[in-house]
Image (cartoon, helix red, strand yellow):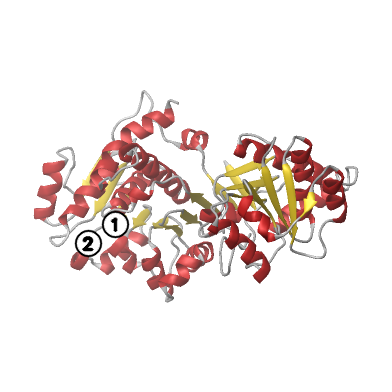
Amino acid sequence: MRRAHTVEQVRAAEASLMARLPEGTLMQRAATGLAVAISNFLGRAYGARVVLLIGSGDNGGDALYAGVRLARRGAHVTAVLLSEKAHEAGLEALLAVGGRVGSPDDIARADVVVDGIVGIGGRPGLRPDAAAAVELAESHNVPIVAVDVPSGVDVDTGETPGPHVRADLTVTFGTHKICHLIDPAASACGPVHLVDIGLDLPQASVESLQDADVRALYPVPHGESDKYSRGVLGLMAGSTQYPGAAVIATAGALGGPIGMIRYVGPDAVAAEVRAAHPEIVAVEGRVQAWAVGSGLGDNLDVPQVRELLEAEEPVILDADGLKALDDSGDHEGVLATPHAGELARLLGVERSTVEAERLKHARLAAERFDATVLLKGATTVIAAPDGHVRVNGNATPWLATAGAGDVLAGLCGAFLAAGLTALDAASLGAYLHAAAANLASDDGPITALSVAAALPEATRQLLQP
C-alpha cells in the first residue's frame, strides 16, 4: 500500500525522531537520498551542471546539502538564492566544496534544476521571483527535480490555486504526501521517489493500492465455490435510448469475480444483452448486490431505485442512477461513481470547482450522502463516509472513451456482489479497470468493450505475477 500523510502527521513524526538523533541527522539522510536520486536521474554526477533554487527553511537546506554531495562527485553546482534566509550552514558547506552562488541566468545552461524553494510547510503559489525562475527552466526545457513536493502546490489537498512547479521527478522523504496522489497536484509531481528517513508514522489519511494489495483483497473462488456463492449481481442498466450501455456494463461485470448476472430492463434491451452475452439471466431473483444507472435515460424510476437503496443488498449508482441519491437515509452499502460534472450537480457547485478541489468534494459528498463516492478522472478518488480515502492513478489517458464508465460500474458491482465492502469494491474495480485499459491500449486507442475483454487477462497477471 502506498500511504500519504498530512503535513501535521509528518511534522510530528520528524520532531519525535529528531529529539532522539544528533542534530542535523535527519537533513543529512534526506540530502543523501536526494543526491543519489538526482545522479540516477541524470545518469551521472561528474560534469553535470546543477542549479539549486533555494528558498528559506529546511527544504532549501536539503537541496544545498545534496548539492554538496554532487559537487564532491564532480558536478558543477550553482545555488540561486530566492530568499535572504537561505539555510546558512548548508550554503557554507556548498561553497566550501567549490559550489557557487549564481543568478537565474545560470538556469538556461543547466542539466537539471533542483526545486528547493518551499517545502511541505509552504503556502500554495509561488512568489514572482520564484515563478520567474521556474518559468525560465521550463522555457529552456531544463528538467526539474522537486525536493519533497513541487513548490507552490497545496500539500494536504492536492490543489494548485496558484503558480507552481511542474516537476520531472519528485524526491520525497519519510512518506508520500497527499499532493503526490491527488490531482491536479499529482500531475505536477512526475514520478515520485520515496527516501526512507526512519519516521514512525500513524495511520495514513490517504492510500493507494499496489499489486500486492489487489491480490490480498481479490475474492478468488475455491474448490467448493458455485455460481451462487461467488455472487449474483442484479444489473439495472440500459434503455431503448442507450441499449449499448447495458451490453457494456454487463461485459464489465463478467470480467469480475461473480458467478452470475441477472439483468432487469426492457425486453428489447434484454435481447441485445443476451445476444452479446448468452450466459446472462434476464429473470428477476435473489441477488447479492445491484448495479444501477448506466444508460437508463428516461427509463430511470427514482422510487424503484430508492427502494433498492433501502434494502439490505449493497448498490452501486452510476450515471442516471445518481439522480436517485439523496441525503435523507443511511447509504452505508452504497457506492456512487460520478464524474466531476455529475458530482458538481449532486453538490450544487460548478464542475470547475470539483475538478480543482477533488479530494475536498469527494469527501464532502461521502459525508453528505453517507455513501462511498468514487470520483472518476485521470486520478480516481474514492472517499468513504468515515473520511478514509483511496486513490488510483495507474490509468492510461486512452481510457477517456465512451462507455468506459459503464465497464467500471459493472466491474465494481461484481465486487460488491462477491462480498467486498463498498470501499474495497471501488478500489479493486478502479485498479483493475485501469490495468485492463493499459493492457488493451498498448499506448494506442481503445474502446470500452476492448477494456472489458482485457479484464480476465489483467486479473490473471495481477493474481499470478
Task: Identify the amino acid type marked 1.
Answer: Val
In x, y percent, where is residue 98? 82, 44
Q: Is residue 320 left or right of 369 when viewed as pictured?
A: left
**Could you say which is closer to the camera, residue 231 or residue 366?**
366
Seen at 25% across and 47% down, the residue is 447
Seen at 79% across and 37% down, the residue is 72
Task: Identify the amino acid type marked 2.
Answer: Leu
Q: Using the image, determine if residue 56 lies above or below residue 436.
A: below
Could you tell me if residue 198 is visible in this image?
A: no
In x, y percent, where is residue 171? 65, 46
Q: Which residue is mark 2?
A: 296
Task: Specify few, some or many for label 2: CA neighbours under 10 Å numbering under 14, 14-19, or 20 or more.
Answer: many
**Could you say which is closer to the camera, residue 92 or residue 241?**
92
User: Pointer 2 and pointer 1: residues touching (CB < 8 Å)?
Assistant: yes
In x, y percent, where is residue 344? 41, 71
Seen at 26% across and 47% down, the residue is 448
Name the secondary structure under disc 2: loop
In x, y percent, where is residue 337? 38, 58
Residue 256 picture quarter: top left
Could you tell me if residue 393 is visible in this image?
A: yes
Position of the N terminus by quadrant: top right
Q: Which residue is mark 1?
A: 292
